[in-house]
Image: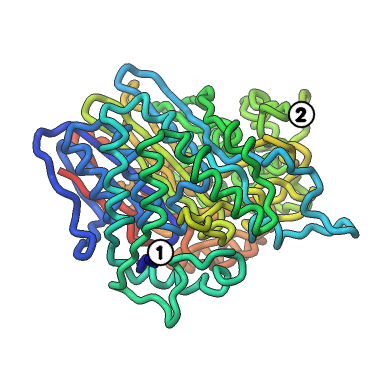
Amino acid sequence: MRQPLIRSCVLCTLIFAAAYGSHAQAQADPYHYSIRKTVVATHGAVVSAHPLASSAGLAILRQGGNAFDAAITTQLALAVVYPAAGNIGGGGFMVAHTAKGRNITLDYREKAPAAATRDMYLDAAGNARTDLSQNGHLASGVPGVIAGIFAELKYARLPLAKLIQPAIDLAQNGFAITAAEARGLNSIQSSLKKYCTVTPVFVREGGWKQGDTLVQEDLAKTLRLIRDNGAKGFYEGETARLILEEMQRGKGIISAADLKRYTAKERTPSVFPYRQYTVVTMPLPSSGGVVLQQMLKMVEDMPLASYGFESLKAVHLMTEVERLAYADRAEYLGDRDFYSVPVDTLTSKPYLLRRMSAFQPDKAGSSKEISAGLLTQKSEETTHFETIDDEGNAVSITTTLNGGYGCRVVVGGAGFFLNNEMDDFSVKPGVPNMYGAVGNEANAIAPGKRMLSSMTPTIVLAKGKPYLVTGTPGGTTITTSVFQTLVDIIDFGLSAEDAVNRPKFHHQWLPDELFVEAGFPAGVQEQLKAMGYTVTLRGSIGRTELIRITPDHKIEAVGDNRGDDTAEGY
């Protein structure tokens, strides 16, 4: 078997603004391509974490595909060119608004295998073994991406054979990796040797460098099986056999029945007003549908615009509502198919007013003193992409393996990474996952249950028409990044480019730290410390992608400067 050569990548966010055009266009040369960060388009645009994926999606739009067609092609291309987060071995969420005015949310989050148990990651002394929930075969949930793609397909216009072919070509023929991709692959060499039972193409003695070619013949074969046999080409037959053999070699617990029974599920969207706009986002098991709604409602009555972007008053207020919302997240949120979550109460105005009574305008809150609200009734390697077309269809999708390159296991003979989403359950109450998030009974492990997620694909409507399409990777920072992006544009009047690229901040209740990116105003940091905050400088927060439809119907598409994210349009 020929071993593919490779280029590297980490996490992925993409956005599509799409219109129909009569001019077909070939994809970019996989060995010579450029990264464009912004585009203003008349007919259509694509933004994603990788230039080749953006190019593939745009080509489909030019060939008459709609926003759903472009989303499927881009998603599959990312599975090839962005192996750290683009995937077929993970799961995701889709939020869409159709030309007929219908809001759709599709859940293809991974599920716990039938053999999973509540305490499967505890040792004999009751200590949490997060090494097992984060690395190796036992960390993987049942993948949902392929089921999700076939659920999306009923809204598309073109046949799957056409939509999947760009990904097959990229896998079979190879592409040149970027410098960032090379760094990512080099960072996991020891993990790949430790956890993979069959040496994958991503292992390279001497390391990867920019311009190296990555060929993935096993992945190309898997994609062809899906093309020819539909979802059964993944959940049954040869690919399923290879997954099961991989599980047996690595002592994993995913079974043939787990794969065969997996289905994607349409859910009722989380829809709520914010100022003069309507926000459409993902409901549970995405925590974003609750947490984003809580945060926006808690600031809606405050004069944010008068405070000013990145002012002390604005950052203090937004940090405290983040703290309050994430305390509720830890206590109450989980898969509603398994646990009764009081969403209506958590997002009600009276409840949120009570929560805001803890806010002190001149002093930092304390997470030791602030817990979840009392009720009267009872993830950073991810990829996000969005599309919008001139018929009025808009699609926002976030998918993930959870950590970068998932559980670090590549399915032998099938060529794709498996996720480590089991770590997104609460493996033990109060024990943080890889993103520092804690949970409780609502997010405990159970067979067939979907783990709580932070992925928050979001569409904002103005007078019933798409205005903003956005989302980001970044684990628990996802929802706060989407929150800040919406407030930056709606309240502070920032441009699309500034809303994406200006420094972000993040607070998630525990740990009780305010994280800020490089470039966050030093003076404001010092003022926050004087108020009692522990301010911690950290690396990049997410990779937000954004589409904005202007009053004159132009499409502004912005790819985040934090990565190889690329905007294409026409």
Residue drawn at (52%, 37%), measured in percent from left and top?
A: 236
| Disc 2 target residue | 375
Image position, residue 65 (x, y; %): 23, 32
**Label 2 is placed on what type of residue?**
Leu
Residue drawn at (68%, 35%), measured in percent from left and top?
A: 448
Residue 98 lies, with reference to residue 204, above or below; the image says above
Image position, residue 198 (x, y; %): 54, 64
* 61 or 372: nearer the viewer: 61
Q: Mark 1 against mark 2, which lies toward the viewer? A: 1
Q: Residue furthest top?
A: 100
In three-dimensional space, the C-alpha distance between marks 1 and 2, rounded to whole angstroms, equals 59 Å
- Residue 1, which numbered label? 1
Q: Is residue 287 visible?
A: yes
Label 1: few (<14), some (14–19) or many (≥20) C-alpha neighbours in 10 Å: few
In the visual, does 195 lie left or right of 12?
right
Question: Judging from the image, what secondary structure is the residue with disc 2 in?
Answer: loop
Question: Judging from the image, what secondary structure is the residue with disc 1 in?
Answer: loop
In the visual, does 153 lie left or right of 116?
left
Q: Residue furthest left?
A: 23
